[in-house]
Amino acid sequence: MSGRHKDKIVASVADALAPLRDSMTILVGGFGLSGNPEALICGVVERGVRDLTLVSNNAGNLGKGLAQWLRAGIIKKVICSYIGGNEDLHTRMASGEVQVEITPQGTLAERMRAAGAGIPAFFTPTGVGTVVEEGKETKEIDGRRYLMERALPGDVALVRAHTADRFGNLRFWRTGRNFNPVMASAARLTIVECDHLVDNGRIDPDDVHLPGIFVHKLVHVPEHENAFEYRTVRKRA
């Protein structure tokens, strides 16, 4: 194994997050609390960086996940697709403490996918005739109006994978995959926390959800809270 492969594995969350600086744009995987890079999220607060632009689905919920960043006061702007019941974000948006840019969920994912593919912008019908259209270029194609949306790159992506090998090839756990792969491809630096770390060759090539070429730093975090938002059970008839 070459030293280049070994360099992706770091000893701690703190080491993994050492490149973070104030005012960066951070892409963070997860859908609600599913697929959150829990240790990296906590580590960013401990790192002490501030004035961050956060790109995520909904910036946490119930005080967990990325809501910790809101409570720590380290975010200046959130680009997300859903606020829902996230009172930490509602409150700070209403007070003006945090600027919020709402983007339709499919558009958000495509903006990051485009960044990873080197596509500067694309046209979509989503949001035409709504507040989403305000300030954006429009174009009629084959008799239908479209909005131009720009690619959304990030300085850093924080990603959680179920299994990783030492080169950074990743496999995600079911719905925990969500936004993680597109965010990894859109960032200049991708930092991954994985539940399981295996040797190169242990992940079948057909099971690789994200190639290691997109991964720069990898930290093994075997223990997670795996919080979820609302417990729902079937009621007996």
Image (spheres, grey):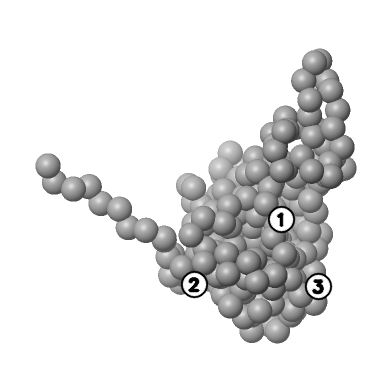
Residue 73 shows in this picture: yes
Most extreme residue toward the left is 237
Q: CA distance from mark 2 to mark 1?
A: 20 Å
Residue 101: numbered disc? 1
Question: According to the image, label 3 marks what residue?
Answer: 23
Residue type, label 2: Gly
Asked whether, in this view, residue 205 is left or right of residue 126, the answer is: left
Q: Are marks 3 and 1 in contact (CB under 8 Å)?
A: no
Residue type, label 3: Ser
Q: Quadrant of the C terminus?
A: top left
Closer to viewer: mark 2 or mark 1: 1
Query: Dot 1: within a 10 Å radius of its alpha carbon, few (fewer than 14), some, or many (20 or more) residues?
Result: some
Residue at left 64%, top 84%?
46
Q: Please state the horizontal and vertical placement of residue 115, each as a whole percent of the image.
A: 80, 47
Question: According to the image, label 2 marks what residue?
Answer: 63
Residue at left 52%, top 63%?
86
Q: Quadrant of the N terminus?
A: bottom right
Give the camera-side residue of 20 and 51. Answer: 51
- Mark 3 secondary-structure assignment: loop
Q: CA distance from mark 2 to mark 3?
A: 23 Å
- Mark 2 secondary-structure assignment: loop
Q: Please state the horizontal and vertical placement of residue 60, each as a whole percent of the image.
A: 54, 64
> Looking at the image, is mark 3 or mark 1 earlier in the sequence?
3
Residue at left 77%, top 40%?
133
Residue 13 shows in this picture: no
Residue type, label 1: Glu
Query: Dot 2: within a 10 Å radius of its alpha carbon, few (fewer than 14), some, or many (20 or more) residues?
Result: some
Q: Is residue 4 above or below residue 132?
A: below
